[in-house]
Image (spheres, coloured by chain):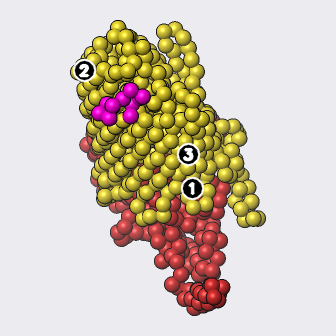
Amino acid sequence: MLKRFASFAILPLAAAAGGATANELNPDVSVTLDGYYKQNETALSHREQGFGLGHTELSLSSPIDDLFSGRLTAVFEEHDGDSEVLIEEAYLQTNGLPYALNVRAGRFLSQVGYLNGRHMHEDDFVERPAAYRAMLGSHYYDTGARLNVLLPTPFFWQVGAEAFAGDQLTEGEEDIGVYTVNTRLGGDISLSQSWQLGLSWLRNRHAKSAETGDGSHDHDHEEGHDHSHGAAYTGENLYIADLVWKWSPDGNNREQQLTLSGEYLYADELNQFAASDDTNEGWYVSGVYQFAPQWSAGVRYGEVDLQEAHGDHFHNQTLEETDVMLSWSRSHFSTVRLQYTHQEAAGFSNADNTVMVQYVMSLGAHGAHGY
Amino acid sequence: MGTDMTLRNAVAALLLIVTAVPAQAQLRVFACEPEWAALVRALVPDAELTTATSHLQDPHYIEARPSLIAAVRRADIAVCTGASLEAGWLPMLLQRASNPDIQAGRPGLFFAADHAQLHAPHDHVDRSMGDVHPEGNPHVHLSPDQLPEIVRALAKRLGEIEPERAVAIQGRYIRWRGDWNGLRAEWRARAEALRGQSVVVQHSNFGYLLRWLGVETAADLEPKPGLPPSASHLSQLLANPELEDANAILIASYQDPQPGEWLAEQTGLPVVVVPGTVTGEAPADTLGGLISEIIRQVESAAAGASHDGV
């Protein structure tokens, strides 16, 4: 008891000796500025043509006491002149429960898939793959609770479950609209190579009662992705498999790193009118090579095969998307990116090719990144 | 019957523990950098060690890989530098591993920098200064005068985690301390000849040792701390009059040697590549051996340079 108190007492003293901690009790503040120029409108995109602001975030985070820490992230967006503030994260998180249990409660990003749990400013491309934009609204966050456990195996093996209100994905009546189950395995192959495999299942109990439109055929395709973060293509079951492999010489990822990643998403039981062969499907593979400390180049290819609900029937839509990007980071906190996107589509009126220039700047505290 | 069995098992287990002290579970240690792994090995030779980084890796930029999360999950104690050196990855490891013993403020998380007087702490830091740590220079493992205090605190902490081995750990600490004092006297004597020499560096990772030796830093290849050397900065360096007095360009083995080699071509200075931390191989397999090796390399570069001068 005394010992624990002593180590508590020493930490702030030691830090204060460094003179750096005048406002140690204030939360860490971080701001992400994301702006872009986009040459043409593209299908399934959350970014409009021309100059625009992307995912502008203000985030506060701090330990609450020795057991809890918390984070609040607000996202500022502007669409057609309307400003909106979205609460993307407002959660508490436990630090070190017995048996390596880990609880998160409040609003947070679901951990399904590889990209979904990551912050958008960590991404290597301007937008998430088409499969994510269509089936998860780029990133699915909601209000609920999560329980994870890290098994005491010699390799990394995490099992977790989440329960959410579900309304951020599909509006509905159920109190608990979404459940997810997720497992993740990973390890090192050698000093220079590491990997992670994830399997996820998302159960959307609101899917069957989802609004399916009036079935009129002059339906405006824009309406399906009106920049709300709800996913436009949902199903009662969403299955995701993801695999990541990273390589850097001697494991020194400061100098060079190659990251290959891919995900496959499959949704069925799309709504009350869906037949058993009506499914949404999408996948992507991405390769990003950081060839110098400040430079990265990457290629990504992805496809989606979707069913757009029109009242009691569906219209099939497909999109093939190829992205090529080059990015330069002056420091760990600033990135400027040039990207070319090529789209080939059926059933989308606004598919096009486009050049984009984007900056992502990080101000203030910069949290540690995940794998 | 059940109680009887349990009791008998308990007695048997107790006997086993009492009689077989050396066969008890190994202490599992997660070391953020190899220098701390080497010190733990000196204090607890049979500890099961996982080292997150090697001398070929830049400890500022490691990823919170799945294997490291699993290792923190299993560890009894994590031994790290602190002072924000691992700010980019350690908090993520601690959070993902959710090991109740290894969390901020608990005895299972040991930061060396908490037991040292760091050089150049800053009251005001902003990012235009580069990646400056407000707490001061965290590369304190090469400070001959500060290590004894760090190792003393580490021995004390390891003894708290493993009370039944505290005496043995304390004994090994005293032996280590004696060896270190001997080495330090030897380095002190060798420093006399090096006093007033100067070297070009890349980042401040040898700062504590160079200052202790009285070797000056003529220039830094990094334009700002943490930013890789740029062509414009290197060409500015060429005009720096302090380069005239430099004896060598000192680079750590995890750093890109090209900027240093370019400057070497322009100036004729030798490039000296030394490990920034303990490696798996002699002579740099202990911290004492590493410091002796760095001093030897700086000496030979200085001797070579003065030779050229004659």
Answer whether labels 3 and 2 touch (C-beta < 8 Å): no
**Frontmost residue, B242 versus A67:** A67
The span picked out in magenta is A269-279
Q: For the residue marked with disc 1, what is the amino acid?
A: Leu
Contact, CB < 8 Å: mark 2 with mark 1?
Answer: no
Earlier in the chain: of badge 2 and badge 1, it is 1
Disc 3 from disc 1: Cα separation: 10 Å
Q: Mark 1 highlights which residue?
A: A101
- Callout 3 crowding tier (Cα within 10 Å): few <14, some 14–19, many ≥20: many
The chain drawn red is chain what?
B
Residue at (47%, 36%) from the top-left corner?
A204
At 44% from the left edge and 64% from the top edge, which residue is drawn? A153
Q: Are marks 3 and 1 in contact (CB under 8 Å)?
A: no
Taking the spot 61% from the left edge, 60% from the top edge, the residue there is A98
Label 2 and label 1: CA atoms lie apart by: 45 Å
Please name the residue that numbered disc 3 is placed on: A146
Disc 1 secondary structure class: strand
Q: Secondary structure at mark 2?
A: strand
Q: Badge 2: few (under 14), some or many (20 or more) residues near its Cα, within 10 Å?
A: some
Please say if A285 is above or below B49: above
| Same subunit, tags 2 and 1 | yes
Residue beneath label 2, please? A345
* Tag in front: 2 or 1: 2
Q: Is residue B216 visible?
A: no
Q: Which chain is yellow?
A: A
